[in-house]
């Protein structure tokens, strides 16, 4: 499975994957045009949307309208390292959400593939080749 990544101009970086073009850019503050999310924003969004997909599926399987549920993600940072130290994901439920499902919902949301890959991280192998 390959993803082609290319540079359309200025600080923009686009990825072609499974028939989609995933666009990124740097903020104006970082020399970009601010025309798309920054790559790290997509990383964070992948965690939140993956978790939300599991929440959505859980609710749908039980006949619970997921439109009444919200997933809110926030981060905590270490300013000295300039790194995220904690990602908090809050699942806001409607008042009538069945109490008996709350623990199971958390367990289901914890199955997010992005989260699992962060916990058992793959090896990142960087190398160069010469174009033919």
Image (tube, grey):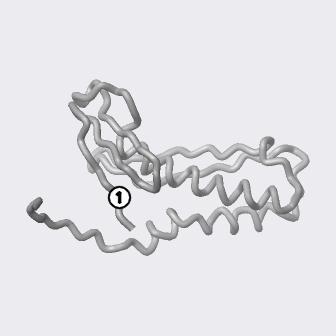
Residue drawn where x is 8% and y is 62% of the image: 130
Residue drawn where x is 69% and y is 66% of the image: 108
Q: Quadrant of residue 63?
A: bottom right
Residue drawn where x is 42% and y is 51% of the image: 43
Q: Position of residue 41 (x, y in %)?
A: 42, 43
Residue 85 is left or right of residue 7, and the answer is right
Pick the front one: 132 or 118: 132
Q: Position of residue 38 (x, y in %)?
A: 36, 39
Q: Quadrant of residue 54?
A: bottom right
Q: Is residue 29 above or below residue 117?
A: above
Which residue is tagged 1?
3
Q: Is residue 102 above or below residue 12?
A: below
Q: How many marks?
A: 1
Q: Position of residue 64 (x, y in %)?
A: 86, 53
Pick the front one: 58 or 6: 6
Residue 104 is left or right of residue 125, and the answer is right
């Amino acid at each position: 499975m390959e993803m082609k990544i290319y540079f359309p101009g200025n600080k923009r970086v686009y990825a072609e994957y499974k028939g989609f073009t995933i666009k990124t850019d740097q903020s104006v503050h970082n020399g970009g045009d601010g025309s798309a999310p920054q790559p790290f924003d997509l990383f964070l969004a992948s965690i939140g949307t993956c978790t939300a997909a599991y929440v959505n599926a859980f609710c749908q399987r039980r006949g619970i309208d997921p439109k009444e549920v919200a997933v809110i993600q926030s981060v905590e940072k270490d300013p000295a390292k300039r790194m995220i130290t904690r990602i908090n994901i809050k699942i806001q439920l409607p008042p009538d959400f069945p109490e008996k499902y709350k623990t199971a919902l958390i367990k289901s949301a914890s199955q997010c593939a992005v989260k699992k890959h962060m916990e058992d991280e793959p090896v990142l192998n960087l190398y160069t080749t010469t174009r033919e």
